[in-house]
């Protein structure tokens, strides 16, 4: 079967492709496994709206009825947000869930693959997966990093959470040749806080500047993605010692309960929200919205040939 048998586009995205409008991909694991209902669906709609306000078209990606859906209806967003039994889909799960016709929510890795198949260069999310703390024992390294090594999509995020080993995550990205761009920052953002204490490769002042780097990388045939780290807005930033404390608690609960593999990240996110009495969720929503603004501008800049 040809590729087009596996992909369907929403009307809005199809029209954007037809006229050559800038498009921004959005992931769906953040909806199904990253946030509780109904905040998750509200966030998803709001993020789409912010992208439209930048004059770009949002394309939330998920797997349904044996198809990669690029652009979801409100009903489809609700379904992902509400239903139990939605599979978290990374690269290895993609063929399985599609072939079975199950409902799947795409992670950063799987969304990059689908975006690339759909011809979309910019993807907005909250945070990327990375090298987990203790990976020297567990070998738990997110497939997101391998995808960044090989798939030509820019990922706009608020960095990585310190549930991960941020230093090792950045080492891994360096080894695989993935540029880590800071959006108006010298410091790689740590999701709930603006700074991780680790530097970025380059600090850009504008989306246009980032776009030029992306275009240059891809013009040179340098395969792979780019991380654009955009710090959480200051007003929503959490206090470092609070974040450190709740992350330690959540990690030790995960250890005690024997949580491993793909369950780890959703478990930790959910525990962080409960332990912080919802504070992490508020910050999470604010940072995704902020990423949507920058991601929309980046897609527009690339589309205008500024890159
Ligand atoms: N970080 C978040 N929210 C999320 C995720 C990460 O703040 O929802 C999701 C993303 O889909 C990411 C995935 O790609 O978790 C990483 O999972 P794993 O560590 O199992 O690769
Ligand atoms: Mn993992």
Image (cartoon, grey):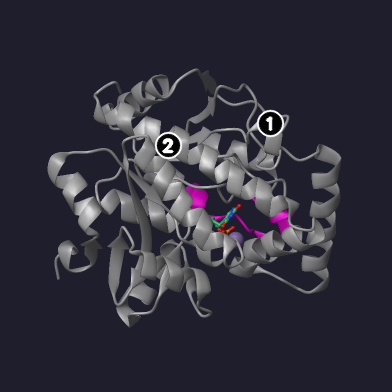
Q: Could you tell me which quadrant the N terminus lies in?
A: bottom left
- Tell me the element at label 2: helix
Residue 177 visible to the viewer? no
- Find ligand 1 in the image and state its quadrant: bottom right
Q: Judge from the rendering whether residue 187 lies leftward or rightward of residue 108; answer left or right.
A: right
Q: Nearer the viewer, residue 64 or 112?
A: 64
Look at the image and give the residue range highlighted in magenta: 131-146
Question: Residue 243: x percent and y percent?
Answer: 79, 46
Q: Residue at x 57, y 66 (%)?
A: 38
Magenta stretch contains residue 149: no
Q: Residue at x 50, y 47 (%)?
A: 125
Mark 2 = which residue? 295
Q: Judge from the rendering whether residue 17 lies leftward or rightward of residue 75; answer left or right.
A: left
- Tell me the element at label 1: helix
Q: Could you tell me which quadrant the C terminus lies in?
A: top left
Crowding at label 2, few (<14), some or many (≥20) Cα neighbours within 10 Å?
many
Mark 1 = which residue? 234
Q: Nearer the viewer, residue 198 or 284?
A: 284
Q: CA distance from mark 1 to mark 2?
A: 19 Å
Q: Nearer the viewer, residue 99 or 36?
A: 36
């Amino acid at each position: 079967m040809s590729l087009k048998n596996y992909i369907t586009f929403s009307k809005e995205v199809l029209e954007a492709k037809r006229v050559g409008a800038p498009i921004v991909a959005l992931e769906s694991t953040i909806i199904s496994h990253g946030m509780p209902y109904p905040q998750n669906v509200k966030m998803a709609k709001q993020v789409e709206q912010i992208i439209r306000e930048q004059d770009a078209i949002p394309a939330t990606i998920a797997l349904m009825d044996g198809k990669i859906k690029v652009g979801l209806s409100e009903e489809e967003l609700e379904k992902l947000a509400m239903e139990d039994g939605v599979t978290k889909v990374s690269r290895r799960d993609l063929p399985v869930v599609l072939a079975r016709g199950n409902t799947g929510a795409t992670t950063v890795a799987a969304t990059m693959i689908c975006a690339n198949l759909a011809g979309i260069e910019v993807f907005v999310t909250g945070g990327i997966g990375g090298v987990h703390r203790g990976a020297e024992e567990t070998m738990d390294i997110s497939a997101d990093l391998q995808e960044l090594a090989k798939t030509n999509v820019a990922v706009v995020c608020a960095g990585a959470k310190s549930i991960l080993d941020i230093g090792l995550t950045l080492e891994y990205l360096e080894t695989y040749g993935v540029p880590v761009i800071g959006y108006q920052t010298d410091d790689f953002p740590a999701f709930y806080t603006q700074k991780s204490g680790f530097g970025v490769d380059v600090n850009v002042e504008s989306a246009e500047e980032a776009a030029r780097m992306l275009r240059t990388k891809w013009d040179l045939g340098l395969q792979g993605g780019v991380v654009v780290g955009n710090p959480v807005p200051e007003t929503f930033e959490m206090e470092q010692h609070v974040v450190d404390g709740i992350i330690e608690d959540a990690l030790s609960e995960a250890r005690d309960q024997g949580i491993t593999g793909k369950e780890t990240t959703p478990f930790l996110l959910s525990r962080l929200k409960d332990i912080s009495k919802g504070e992490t969720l508020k910050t999470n929503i604010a940072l995704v919205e902020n990423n949507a603004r920058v991601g929309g501008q980046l897609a527009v800049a690339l589309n205008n040939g500024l890159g």
